Amino acid sequence: SGSGKSTLLACLAGLDEPDGGVVHVGGERISHRPEAERARMRARRIGVLSQSGNLIAHLDVRANIRLARGATPGTAGQSVGELLDQVGLGHRARALPRELAGGELARAGLAVALANDPDILLADEPTGELDGATEQRVLRLLCSRALAGGGVLLVTHSPEAVKIADRVITLRDGRAS
């Protein structure tokens, strides 16, 4: 806690501006641009899963995914049903966020983050509230995205997630090691 993980993710997603340097996604600079441009780039290229959730409370899970897809018309990719099946929530498509348990909320948020088949997924504790079997399912999904060429950056305390990582960077007091 307090090492700068969430701030780093916010800068990488174009939600905050870095104090120094620039952030590029897919060869395109996202930092130090107007918010409207950053938002368009985020919708097209970056999937963000935050710990606080990324679901609209009055929309069911399916509608949340469709809303995310609406931000980038013409986005190809999996159907909403296929995406929900991948995260193990096909049976909860019509549930509102308040009807979901913590682990289901995290997986629904992951489905929303993946809705536009982003170049990179930035995920803050994606397995934090999951049981062991569900954590393994989510980690397999993230691995398959990475193997297919998508970028996956996790902020995690999970030893299981660390085991599958290609690279582990530790943050302490805002410094990478």
Image (cartoon, rainbow, N blue to C red):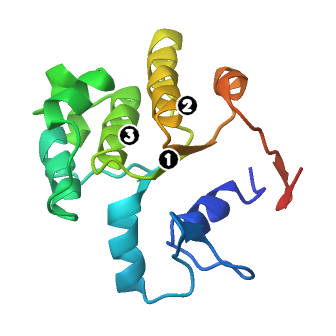
From the viewer's perspective, is 74 left or right of 45?
Answer: left
Vertically, is 84 above or below 134? below
How far across and how far down the image is residue 124, in percent?
55, 46
> Which type of secondary structure does the marked residue at label 1 adopt?
loop
From the viewer's perspective, is 69 left or right of 130?
Answer: left
- The mark that comes first in sequence, 1 or 2, is 1
- The residue indicated by pointer 2 is 128
How far across and how far down the image is residue 155, in percent?
64, 44
Q: Residues within 10 Å of mark 3 (few under 14, many from 20)?
A: many
Q: Residues within 10 Å of mark 1 (few under 14, many from 20)?
A: some
1 vs 81, nearest the viewer: 81
Vertically, is 136 above or below 89? above
Q: Are marks 1 and 2 in contact (CB under 8 Å)?
A: yes
How far across and how far down the image is residue 129, in percent?
50, 28
Indicate the amino acid at tag 1: Gln
9 vs 29, nearest the viewer: 29
How far across and how far down the image is residue 134, in percent?
44, 16
Indicate the amino acid at tag 3: Leu
- The residue indicated by pointer 3 is 110
Residue 156: image quadrant is: top right
- The mark that comes first in sequence, 1 or 3, is 1
Q: Nearer the viewer, mark 1 or mark 3?
A: 3
- The mark that comes first in sequence, 3 or 2, is 3
**In 3D space, how far apart are the residues under numbered discs 1 and 3 (Cα atoms)?**
11 Å
Indicate the amino acid at tag 2: Gly
From the viewer's perspective, is 53 left or right of 129?
Answer: left
- The residue indicated by pointer 1 is 51
Q: Nearer the viewer, mark 3 or mark 2?
A: 3
At 53% from the left and 35% from the top, the residue drawn is: 146
**In 3D space, how far apart are the residues under numbered discs 1 and 2 (Cα atoms)?**
9 Å
44 vs 81, nearest the viewer: 44
Q: Identify the mark at residue 29; answer none if there is no mark.
A: none
